């Protein structure tokens, strides 16, 4: 069964450093998303992406965040200058077009630890 | 606007007894509703989904959920808990399409299910 994959599973970085989190969505999906979950808190929407542009972003997704689909398979989230409060689990998700567009399939997540 | 409320942050049951995880939603439109499960240090796995077909939805691992419009509820149940069911469960609501054609989802705060041997 196709699934969303994410790398790395765990990333440790120093405050102020740039990180890139990578995702490979399900191959025939066209909508892509990033969410984050700070430890002990709810899953929060960051951004959605379709047709090579951002469809919607939350207030969390400020100028230090960016997303890119550099090729036909990867979808990346970049944090330019990490802060301690960026420590969280980051989930990538994708969904298809058509009648199943409401169902988002999630990857296993990348745990980001900012020291 | 859409929102979802999971009424219990923690539920504890004995192995072999029924499970009930409660979820109430608010939506301006006819929503799609989902339950996802997250095992420790794992990602979010789709358990089941309601999209205006049958109101009783069967999912994986013996779970099911009933959509009750009059009560704006979508509670998750399982007749007999297994140790492997210990995890965190998220109720998710998705309604009107936003720009770009996809449907925005909102997560509940999650319910941690403990299964006692």
Image (cartoon, coloured by chain):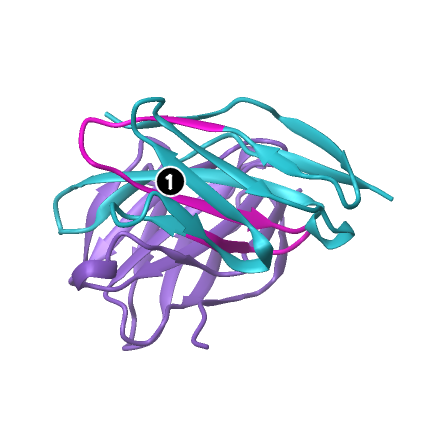
Chain colours: A purple, B cyan
Residue at the image point whose x is 57% and y is 33% from the top: B21
Residue A54 image offset from top left, x and y in percent:
21, 50
> Chain letter of disc 1?
A
Task: Report whether B92 appears left or right of A10.
Answer: left
Residue A79 seen in the current view = no
Q: Quarter holding the C terminus of chain B? A: top right
Residue A72 image offset from top left, x and y in percent:
27, 77
Residue at the image point whose x is 22% and y is 42% from the top: A56
Q: Residue B30's image quarter?
A: top left
Q: Residue A103's image quarter?
A: bottom left
Give the dominant element type of the magenta stretch: helix, strand or loop.
Answer: strand
Residue at the image point whose x is 60% and y is 52% from the top: A111
Residue A76 image offset from top left, x and y in percent:
38, 62
Q: Secondary structure at mark 1?
A: strand
Residue A74 position (above or below residue A19): below
The residue indicated by pointer 1 is A45
Q: How many marks?
A: 1
Residue A80 position (above or below residue A106): above
Task: Report the front residue among A47 and B23.
Answer: B23
Q: Quarter holding the N terminus of chain B? A: top left
Q: Is residue B27 magenta?
A: yes
Residue B9 position (above or below residue B38): above
Residue A32 seen in the current view = yes
Q: Is residue B72 magenta?
A: no
Task: Report whether B31 appears left or right of A104.
Answer: left
Residue B39 image offset from top left, x and y in percent:
65, 51
Task: Report the front residue among A102 and B101.
Answer: A102
Region rendered in magenta: B23-48
Q: Residue A88's image quarter?
A: top right
Q: Bin the neighbour count of mark 1 within 10 Å (Cα to Cα): few under 14, some 14-19, many 20 and up.
A: many
């Amino acid at each position: 069964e196709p699934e969303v994959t994410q790398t790395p599973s765990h990333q440790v970085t120093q405050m102020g450093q740039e990180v890139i989190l990578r995702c490979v969505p399900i191959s025939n999906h066209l909508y892509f998303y990033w969410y984050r979950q700070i430890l002990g808190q709810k899953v929060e929407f960051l951004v959605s992406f379709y047709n090579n542009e951002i469809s919607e972003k939350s207030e969390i997704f400020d100028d230090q965040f960016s997303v890119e689909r550099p090729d036909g398979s990867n979808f990346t989230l970049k944090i330019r200058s990490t802060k301690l409060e960026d420590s969280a689990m980051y989930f990538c998700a994708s969904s298809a077009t058509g009648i199943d567009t409401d169902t988002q399939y999630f990857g296993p997540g990348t745990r980001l630890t900012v020291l | 606007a859409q929102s979802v409320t999971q009424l219990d942050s923690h539920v504890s049951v004995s192995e072999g007894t029924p499970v009930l995880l409660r979820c109430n939603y608010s939506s301006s439109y006819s929503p799609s509703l989902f339950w996802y499960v997250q095992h420790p240090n794992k990602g979010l796995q789709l358990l089941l989904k309601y999209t205006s077909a049958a109101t009783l939805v069967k999912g994986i691992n013996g779970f099911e959920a009933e959509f009750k419009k009059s009560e704006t509820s979508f509670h998750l149940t399982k007749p007999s808990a297994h140790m492997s069911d210990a995890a965190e469960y998220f109720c998710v609501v998705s309604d009107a399409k936003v720009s770009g054609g996809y449907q925005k989802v909102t997560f509940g705060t999650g319910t941690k299910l403990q299964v006692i041997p």
